[in-house]
Every structure is written in structure tokens, then in C-alpha cells.
Amino acid sequence: MTQRRFIYTAYRLGDQQNAKRLIAITLHPQFDAMQRIDTLRLLAIWTNPHELDRHLLAAITKLQKSNILGEAIEILNAASKSENKKITAAFKAYTLAIGADLQKKFNVSLLGGDALNGKSLFTSHPTAACARCHSIGKNGGNAGPNLEGIASVIDRKTILESLIDPSARIAPGFGNVSIITKQKKTLTGMFLGEKNGVIKLKVGNDIMKIKLDEVSTLNKLPSSMPPMHLLLKEREVRDIVAFIDSLKQNKKTPGAKSH
């Protein structure tokens, strides 16, 4: 029996004391984010969560200090449904503090997540349609960069930022730039990185090297990718971040079969 089912059964059978003890254990940081997420989902659906308010209040208080928690979305969902005045006040304070800051709002999608569900969303979401433009290895579209091994190049924070604000920054090998040299020559291509004062640029099938001291201007080109916050919910973004973060060099993607 899973930890989630064990807690649920204990609660439904009336063994609330044991259920509370199990919840307190599962919410301990030693358990991974997905286990804590499952527990917090129970808090959101139980009809009488008042006995668990202490745990939820502690969680949202922690969230106010840093909304980068694997179970942040579940904490907020449970808090939004609580009838406890202290929790309601804490939830309102959190919402006001976030305001219209998109990055802060989506920090809840940074940690945790279900990589397998993220893979499903990546390949088959009807509107986000990631796989129509991006390939992983030999599978997918070619309008955008191939994402195979991307998690060996950028971290989760950059992955999240690239989903909600695709034009914010350029990871080497995953964005286009326009360069005007001091000789008034314009070069447009994929930015492959800069090292020791030399920029590497892929123009068509050619790799070009341009010295930084020869560059007059360098401009990032807007991404054609739509911001995912307009198409996906926070939980869906979190799952896709988890999936893309699994795309490291020489590492099988979730659900991959051995041959």
C-alpha cells in the first residue's frame, strides 16, 4: 500500500490520530517532493481539514519566505480552500506579495513535478504542442532547437524561465542572435557560446568564430515560441520542467525502453 493510500485509509476508517501522525511524518523534508505533494493533495480534497490546519499554516508560512518548494502548488491549492482565518490571511498575504510578477508566480513550478506526465504534455498537449517544433534526438519537429541533452547545458531555473519567457536569455545552442561587426557586416545565426573572447555562431551549416573586440552590436532575436504561461497551468509547467530537466547527455528519458 502506498503512503498516500495508507494515510487516506487511516483517515476514512476514523483512525484520525494515526492519520495525523502519518501526515506529519510524510511532510518531513526527508521524504521526496512527490510524496509530500500526494499528502498535500489529500489536504485539499478532504471535507474536514481543520485538524490538519497546523501543518498547512506552517507550510504556507514557509512558502511566504520562499515559494520555491516542490509542493508549493498543492500548499496554495489547499490554502485557497481552507476556512481557517489564519490560513486565509496567510494565503491573501502571499498572493499580494507575488502581485503581477510572472517569475515569482511561476517559481512554484521550479521544483518537484512528474517527469512522465511532463513527457506526455510535451508530446501531446493540444495547444502547447512542444514536440511540433522541438525534437529530442530524432523524434519531433525541427522548427526549434533539438532539446536532446539540454539539461546538461542549463539548469532548472533557466528551463523554467525559457518556458514562461522564451526571449529572456539564450543558452548556448538554443537561441539565435544577430551580430553587426565593426566592419558593418551582419551575421545571423545560432549562438553556440563565447569563450576566451571569441563567439561561436552557427550560420546555416557553417560554424563561424567572431572575436568580441570585432563586434559592434549583438542582439538576441525574439523567440517564435509562445510563452507557456499563456497555455499551461502551473502544475503542467512544473511537470514539463521536470521532464526537460531529465534530458541530460547519455541519460534515458522517462519512459524510454531498453533495446
Image (cartoon, rainbow, N blue to C red):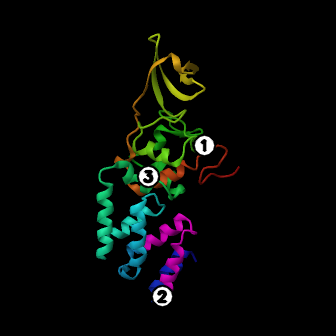
Establish if 222 lies above or below 81.
Answer: above
Sequence-earlier tag: 2 or 3: 2
The 10 Å Cα crowd at callout 2, few under 14, some 14 to 19, many 20 or more, is few
Q: Earlier in the sequence, mark 1 or mark 3?
A: 1
Residue 101 magenta: no
Q: For residue 17, which numbered disc appears in the image?
A: 2
Question: Could you tell me residue 153's position as x and y percent?
Answer: 58, 40
- Amino acid identity at mark 3: Val
Query: Residue at 40% across / 52% down in the picture?
Result: 106
Residue tagged 3: 237
Q: Report the span colored magenta.
A: 18-42
Quarter occupied by the N terminus: bottom right
User: For the residue marked with disc 2, what is the amino acid?
Assistant: Gln
Percent position of residue 156, x then y? 52, 49
The mark lying in front, picked from 2 and 3, is 2
Tell me the SS state at disc 2. Answer: helix
Residue farthest bottom in this picture: 14
Q: Which residue is mark 1?
A: 152
